[in-house]
Image (cartoon, rainbow, N blue to C red):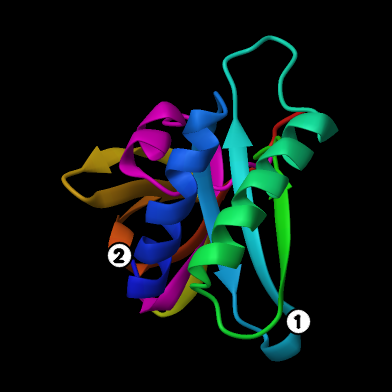
Amino acid sequence: MSAKYTILEELIRPVVEGLGFEFWGMEYLSLGKDSVLRIFIETDDEKGIDVEDCARVSRQVSSILDVEDPITGEYNLEVSSPGLDRPLFSLAQYQAYVGSVVSLRLRVPFDGRRKFKGQLVGLESEDVVIRVDQEEYLLPIDLIDKANVVPQF
């Protein structure tokens, strides 16, 4: 994790949890004038996350970020549920989705490729085990740039 991510998480997580939601994770995409801070929230409530929940979190997080000012320049703040194709950020989240189909994009190539889509077999220490076409890969979690659950219908 980058230092910027750590600073942002330390500011945002307590706000999200203070409002009664689970901080699922976040993405910060630095794209010049079009930078985006995307926050994912979850709940145990049967109704799930709705637009009002996202708006409440957005208002509170925005207030904290305005005061602390950890992001230089303009950015868009987005708050949403993780959705069906939920991103995976932590080892606990990977563990919860063992057996599911996942899509992984790596920061650097591993065994000649950067993209993997297959069944999440498990975890070994801090490595993710994924089966792609009957072949298993042991991928260090630090190499994973983006991971999502692939919904199966």
Whether residue 143 sits left or right of residue 53 in the image: it is: left
Kind of residue at badge 2: Asp
**Residue shown at 70% from the left, 47% from the top:** 58
Kind of residue at badge 1: Asp
Q: Which mark is residue 51?
A: none
Q: Nearer the viewer, residue 67 or 44?
A: 67
Q: Nearer the viewer, residue 149 or 50?
A: 50
Q: Nearer the viewer, residue 153 or 35?
A: 35
Name which quarter of the figure residue 83 lies in. top right
User: On the rendered image, what quadrant is the N terminus found in?
Assistant: bottom left
Q: Position of residue 24 (x, y in %)?
A: 51, 40
Q: Earlier in the sequence, mark 2 or mark 1?
A: 1
Span colored in magenta: 85-111
Residue 140 visible, this orientation:
no
Q: Which mark is residue 34?
A: 1
Q: How many other residues sit within 10 Å of disc 2, few (<14), some (14-19) or many (≥20)?
A: few
**Residue lying furthest left in this view?**
125
Whether residue 106 sits left or right of residue 19 in the image: it is: left
Name which quarter of the figure residue 81 lies in. top right
Tag 2–tag 1 contact (CB < 8 Å) = no
**Residue shown at 44% from the left, 70% from the top:** 106
Q: Which mark is residue 142?
A: 2
Mark 2 or 1, which is nearer the eye?
A: 1
Q: Position of residue 85 (x, y in %)?
A: 67, 42
Q: Is residue 95 magenta?
A: yes
Q: How many other residues sit within 10 Å of disc 1, few (<14), some (14-19) or many (≥20)?
A: few
